[in-house]
């Protein structure tokens, strides 16, 4: 996988991760191991956001 992200894809991924983690922080009540779950969710949402950015935002080359 030698694809490079353009600036719009990075921006989309950043906002996707920010929204997922904000929803997790504000809507999920406190429980044991919430910080570990937060870190894992951050990694998973980064992966999913990166994949979605490649599917949604096509790299336009002229």
Image (cartoon, rainbow, N blue to C red):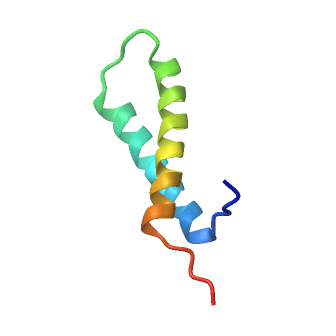
**Farthest residue toward the bottom?**
62
Instruction: Classify 27 as above or below 49.
Output: above
In the image: residue 31, left or right of residue 15: left
Q: Residue at x 49, y 36 (%)?
A: 44
Image location of residue 51, percent across then percent down: 50, 53
The residue lying furthest to the right in this view is 2
**Taking 40 as reference, is 32 above or below it?**
above
Number of marks: 0
User: How far across and how far down the image is residue 60, in percent?
Assistant: 56, 81
Instruction: Point out residue 7 in the picture as x, y percentages from the top left corner.
Output: 62, 69
Q: Residue at x 63, y 90 (%)?
A: 62
Please, which residue is most extreme toward the top here? Answer: 32
In this rendering, position of residue 37 left or right of residue 30? right
In the foreground, 40 or 26? 40
Give the residue drawn at x 46%, y 12%.
33
The quadrant holding residue 10 is: bottom right
Identified at 48% across, 27% down, the residue is: 38
Q: Nearer the viewer, residue 49 or 35?
A: 49
**Please, is residue 31 above or below residue 12 in the view?**
above
Query: Could you tell me residue 53's position as x and y percent?
Result: 49, 61
Residue 29 lies in quadrant: top left
In this rendering, the answer to whether 3 lies above or below 8 is: above
């Amino acid at each position: 996988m030698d694809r490079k992200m353009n600036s719009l894809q990075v921006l989309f991924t950043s906002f996707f991760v920010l929204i997922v983690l904000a929803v997790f922080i504000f809507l999920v009540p406190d429980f044991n191991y919430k910080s570990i779950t937060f870190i894992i969710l951050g990694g998973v949402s980064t992966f999913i956001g990166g994949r979605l950015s490649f599917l949604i935002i096509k790299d336009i080359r002229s």
